[in-house]
């Protein structure tokens, strides 16, 4: 398949007739990758079972992993769900459009192929105006998982999407680098107390302030609980670079010292080190990649790109600093731990 490329720009929007062309591909059951404020999505018509099948095939994703329906305005929600709990109203008012996905009991209209066979459906209204214009123009809810091959880090630029999906989908909309870089916060509203299934830029504290009580999914709260995560996608090995990665937690100096000691056991071109702008100079031996700046709060935005860079460098092993304490640290550390297959070494002492 020949993949068509078009561009969207914050000032100029879409080129003449291009939004309509992209929307028509979606309506007719084709696949279009588009930018959102979190990560790039791989869009298909959310009401067509055949479109869901194409999405799973293009990504190489297991078809029991449900898709998020993207809408362009809150009025598009009622036909998709059986009821809208009170907490949902408050959350939508406070955080939509934005990086928040809500899970409801699904209406008949939504095919089970889209929801991975579940009776519930995930819905999000993105903030990105290019995304919303596209959805509005398509006139259907747009089912969109992250636009990466299954198991690879989510794409935060059109170049990442091309790397994974060129030739496998109809169109890629290049809207430059995304703003947030980590996927939306997911909240399950089908329980008595709303449950966070995936941490994101909308934090537990922000949610609690808006609606009072929220809980963390047992599978997130601590791996010790042994409970399986409730969002099916959270159980798969995910966001993973090809090399084995270990995260080092502890005081900054102890982390630097330990990473440097281990790094010297490898040829410099075969060892990757994940650091920040503030700490990159501390590592004389190895391929140092920075996710972003701690001070500027850009670690989340650069994390997935950094993981992809390690693949291009062809390193055999990766040692990562910890980023707890930074902006979006809950979401950053959740993704980083998964990328590391939960290999975390905690350093004690000085
Ligand atoms: O920021 C985002 O949410 C991005 C952009 C494109 O909007 N999308 C995204 O989709 O991250 P995806 O498919 O990569 O991740 C969706 C997650 C999966 O872990 C899936 O299992 C979970 O949401 N999910 C979807 N529907 C669900 C449902 N009905 N119940 C529980 N979990 C659900
Ligand atoms: Mg994904």
Image: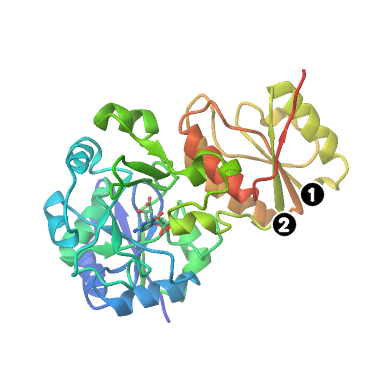
- Identify the residue at image location x=34%, y=72%: 31
Density class for disc 1 (Cα within 10 Å; few <14, some 14-19, many ≥20) is: some
Q: Position of residue 55 (x, y in %)?
A: 39, 72
Q: In this figure, what is the number of numbered marks? A: 2
Look at the picture and state if 335 lies above or below 68. Answer: above
Q: Position of residue 142 (x, y in %)?
A: 26, 63
Q: Is mark 1 within 8 Å of ligand 2?
A: no
Question: What secondary structure is marked by label 2?
Answer: loop
Q: Is residue 253 visible?
A: yes
- Identify the residue at image location x=39%, y=37%: 215
Residue 307 lies left or right of residue 6; in this view the side is right
Q: Are marks 2 and 1 in contact (CB under 8 Å)?
A: yes
As measured in the structure, the alpha-carbon distance from the residue carrying label 2 to the one carrying label 1 is 8 Å
Q: Is residue 154 visible?
A: no
Residue under circle 1?
269
Look at the picture and state if 340 lies above or below 62. Answer: above
Question: What secondary structure is marked by label 1?
Answer: helix
> Which residue ends up furthest to the right in the rendered image?
265
Work out whether residue 106 or residue 341 is closer to the camera in this orientation and state it. 106
- Identify the residue at image location x=65%, y=46%: 342
Where's the C terminus, which quadrant?
Answer: top right
Residue 55 lies left or right of residue 306; in this view the side is left
Residue 24 lies left or right of residue 255; in this view the side is left
The quadrant of the rendered image in which ligand 1 is seen is bottom left
Residue under circle 2?
314
């Amino acid at each position: 398949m020949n993949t068509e490329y078009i561009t969207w720009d914050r000032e100029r929007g879409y080129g003449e007739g291009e939004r309509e062309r992209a929307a028509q591909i979606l309506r007719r059951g084709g696949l279009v990758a588009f930018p959102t404020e979190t990560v790039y999505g791989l869009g298909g018509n959310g009401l067509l079972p055949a479109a869901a099948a194409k999405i799973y095939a293009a990504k190489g994703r297991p078809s029991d992993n449900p898709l998020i329906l993207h809408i362009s305005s809150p009025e598009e929600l009622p036909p998709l769900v059986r009821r809208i709990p009170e907490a949902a109203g408050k959350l939508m008012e406070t955080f939509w459009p934005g990086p928040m996905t809500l899970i409801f009991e699904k209406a008949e209209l939504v095919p089970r192929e889209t929801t991975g066979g579940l009776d519930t459906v995930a819905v999000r209204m993105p903030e990105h105006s290019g995304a919303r214009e596209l959805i509005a123009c398509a006139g259907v809810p747009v089912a969109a998982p992250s636009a990466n091959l299954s198991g690879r880090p989510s794409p935060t630029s059109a170049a990442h999407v091309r790397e994974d999906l060129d030739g496998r989908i109809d169109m890629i909309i290049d809207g430059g680098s995304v703003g947030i870089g980590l996927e939306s916060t997911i909240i399950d509203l089908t329980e008595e107390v709303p449950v966070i299934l995936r941490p994101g830029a909308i934090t537990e504290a922000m949610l609690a302030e808006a609606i009072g009580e929220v809980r963390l999914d047992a599978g997130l709260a601590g791996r010790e609980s042994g409970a399986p995560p409730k969002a099916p996608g959270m159980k798969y090995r995910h966001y993973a670079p090809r090399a084995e990665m270990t995260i080092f937690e502890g005081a900054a100096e102890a982390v630097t010292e330990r990473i440097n000691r281990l790094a010297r056991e490898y040829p410099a071109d075969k060892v990757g080190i994940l650091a920040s702008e503030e700490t990159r100079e501390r590592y004389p031996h190895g391929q140092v990649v920075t996710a972003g700046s701690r001070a500027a709060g850009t670690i989340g935005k650069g994390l997935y790109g950094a993981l992809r860079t390690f693949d291009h460098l062809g390193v055999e092993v990766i040692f990562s600093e910890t980023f707890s304490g930074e902006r979006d640290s809950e979401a950053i550390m959740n993704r980083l731990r998964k990328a590391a297959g939960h290999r975390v070494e905690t350093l004690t002492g000085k």
